[in-house]
Image (tube, grey):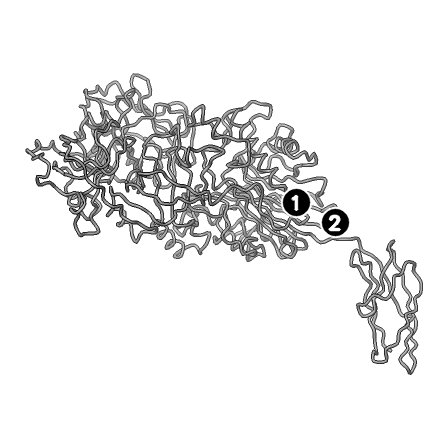
Amino acid sequence: MKKTILAASVAMLLAPTAYAELFISEYVEGSGNNKALEFYNPTDSSLNLADYRINVFFNGSSSASVSVALNGELAPGATYVFASASAAEELLLLADQTVGGGLWNGDDAITLTKNDVVVDSIGQVGFRPSGSWGSGSITTANDTLRRAAVSYDTNPFDTFEPADQWLGFAQDDFSDIGLFNGEGGDPIDPDPEFDLSCGAPYTPIHQIQGSGDASPLVGQALVVEAVVTQTLPGLQGFTIQSLPGTEDNDPMTSEGIFVYTGSANLTVATGQRVRLQANVAEFFTMTQLTGIAANVDCGTSALPAAAALTLPVPDMANWEAHEGMLVSFAQPLTVNDTFTLGRFGELTLASGRRYTPTQVVAPGAEAIALAEAQQLNRIILDDNSTVQNPALVPYPVPGLSAANPVRGGDSVVGLTGTLHYSFNEYRIMPNAPVTILADNPRSLSPALQADGNVKVASFNVLNYFNGNGLGGGFPTSRGADSALEFERQRAKILAAMAGLDATVIGLMELENDGFASTSAIADLVVGLREATGQMDWQFVQPEVSPIGTDEISVGLLYRADLLVPAEATRILDSANSALDGSGQPLFDDSRNRPMLAQRFRLLENNAEFAVMVNHLKSKGSGCGSADGDTGDGQGNCNLSRTRAAEAIGIFAEQHFADIPALVIGDLNAYAKEDPITTLAAAGYYNVFEVLGKTDSYGYVFQGLVGSLDHALLNQHALDVLADAAKWNINADEPIALDYNTEFKTEQQLFDYYAPDAYRSSDHDPVIVALQLAPVYPPLDINLELIRVNRSRSGATLVQLRWSSDAEQALTLYRDDTPVTTLSRPGRYNDQFKNPAVNSATYRLCLDSTAQCSAPLVVNF
């Protein structure tokens, strides 16, 4: 057992009083058999480990496949390491207990029980994720996880998100095993005697901070005298900064530091000069003072001026050089991400909007360079608290609600506060009210400059699952967890669909449960008829049901009063895909959802067009090592998406080369990625690039905007293009305003929800307007010459014979100038005098349809 120097009393201050209990403090799921768990005792008593068991649930099972009792006793503030007996020697040397046989993989749940009662857990019992829980560097597969603080997950059956309580580290990182919170070693010597009289010598803050990432004085007890610059009860501490005039001249050493008290009841005030005896510590790489042994009031002091910062910063060291200091931004900062606003009271800010690199530059070196640069252009605006799901989210003033949102693209002006570091992010703890300007207000409808006569929309409906279609069947596997959630989701989805005012709507993430009256797509049609008052909405129904084997599918809805299908619905899947050079299907429907394609005819003028709706493999999915993330910015499964795009291009050429055609849907690829360029090479062009709307976006991921949902048009469609738009009703909105009921108070269930289009999904709809030219039945118009007479003076008689099956009058043109109107087939004598003209070209036309006879050239 390894004893840490983190005092049990401090740990107890961090821990919820209801759970003063053993918990899992570190998790290792490394290469091979490198599996380990670290347990920590935050109580003030020794624990009998024989009361505890580790239980492992393989592959989504609800029954434990491995159950092992711990042994021995664990002292207060001590750690206990459990590992696989086949782990690397480095890990075995740190273990207190080992066990043979297989342990967990990244998709297996783990519980810690005491006398058969769950006291902590990792994962979700009874559910098997796709490879792991979590994302990025904080996952349960091939990663090391460390608890951010003393915390517990006593419900092993609820949704598990590692980032809520854990920090991620590299695979096979054993550097902290047995050292909870990164501290350990032998007991320290008693503190020396310190002079606590005001004005006596002390250690300056810049010396404590040093010029590197960590303090050179970690673990030392010392005295510091400084001014309190901000009290932060929500962080259980306050910040102090060097007294004005005592700073050093090194721009790389910070003059501020956070003082952790372990209590929200602070006994200091801003502007107070204090003298503290404390210990220097690094709490998850943030330098702070802890273990306050003495706090002397030395009067008051002027506050130091806030250091002026500008985004982007020159390098990451610039943040470290200001850690703990008062800082300010004169520039307006743009809201780039609202994802964690409801959960943690946070906003991600930057100078302007930042685009996903492969939305604007080619994958590879350019994308990698842009991604690195973007890391210097972001800062988190915090709410000065570590509380999750706060009852009041302060942004925007007076508080977040469905009627008072803050959106991506809004601006924060005059921001000042303390620069803090926690949860792997630099963040501003504001010391004054935050001013947010609504620079990106909601729009009531898509901003189309022209509607055309057909509008084709694409909309990802965020796992629209309607249970059993009879009011039951909840929770669903991917969508709503209850009938109430579905009612809320349905109202928002229908409001968005109605607001599109489209003629055709392609759908993605629709429950793949066929086309019966209880199906999800039938439910949407019924709801859309009610929402719009237009009873002619129909769904396209192919000959197969369901479409493919995935839980979700694509779908097509259309206005039957305006359109009719011109031929049978087509599907592109592995069975009919074009083949590669090895004879394998380019379109793999075990990864990509089958494509649905329909040729339509516009009733008003017989024009035909085609819509192909797609949902390709996601970037976060696993496609094996042969199609993994190559690091060029395109994510996992790029090869699968690109091959599918090649197959789509071939399919489109085979079936729709003669008419306007659109490839729409969630292609899970940004604008400069291989699938989009592959389709461009096949003659299907990004409509927003054609229109010069390259700054458009429809999705936000990790604070970066881009477009995964596309409208790609062939040349015939571009020839009749009226306009196109992305309706930004979702990506810019806080996720807290969606239909879900989790993590919300009773008041928030009311305040955060409105049955409107905003945050109906996580993807924004795309809409394209076309002005389709009329197509008329063939018309037989014949015009022939009988004879020509011409005098010496130039007087000319041209006798013509004509016939037609047109019911309307026709216009006779000579050299494109109207001569007369003819109603009945027969002869016509055209007389004129122009000695300078030696020939004339005649045409007989039905002007309403621009249908004409073949040109008749008459020479004199």
Amino acid marked by disc 1:
Gln
In the rendered structure, find residue 598 and report the number of the disc placed on it: 1
Is 19 positioned to the left or the right of 749 in the image? left
Q: Is residue 324 visible?
A: yes
Image quarter for residue 742? top left
Image depth: mark 1 or mark 2 in front: 2
Residue 159 percent across, percent down from the top left = 41, 29
Which is nearer the eye, 756 or 705?
Answer: 756
Which is nearer the eye, 574 or 461?
Answer: 461
Q: Is residue 89 visible?
A: no
Is 76 positioned to the left or the right of 363 in the image? left
In the rendered structure, find residue 606 and report the number of the disc placed on it: 2
Kind of element beneath mark 1: strand
Is 337 positioned to the left or the right of 233 in the image? right
- Tag 1 and tag 2, C-beta contact below 8 Å: no
Residue 457 percent across, percent down from the top left = 60, 44
In the rendered structure, find residue 515 and report the number of the disc placed on it: none
Kind of element beneath mark 2: loop
Which is nearer the eye, 288 or 329?
Answer: 329
Residue lying farthest left? Answer: 193
- What residue is at 92 percent from the left and 80 percent from the top? 791
Is the residue marked by circle 2 packed among few (<14), some (14-19), or many (20+) residues within 10 Å?
A: some
Amino acid marked by disc 2:
Asn
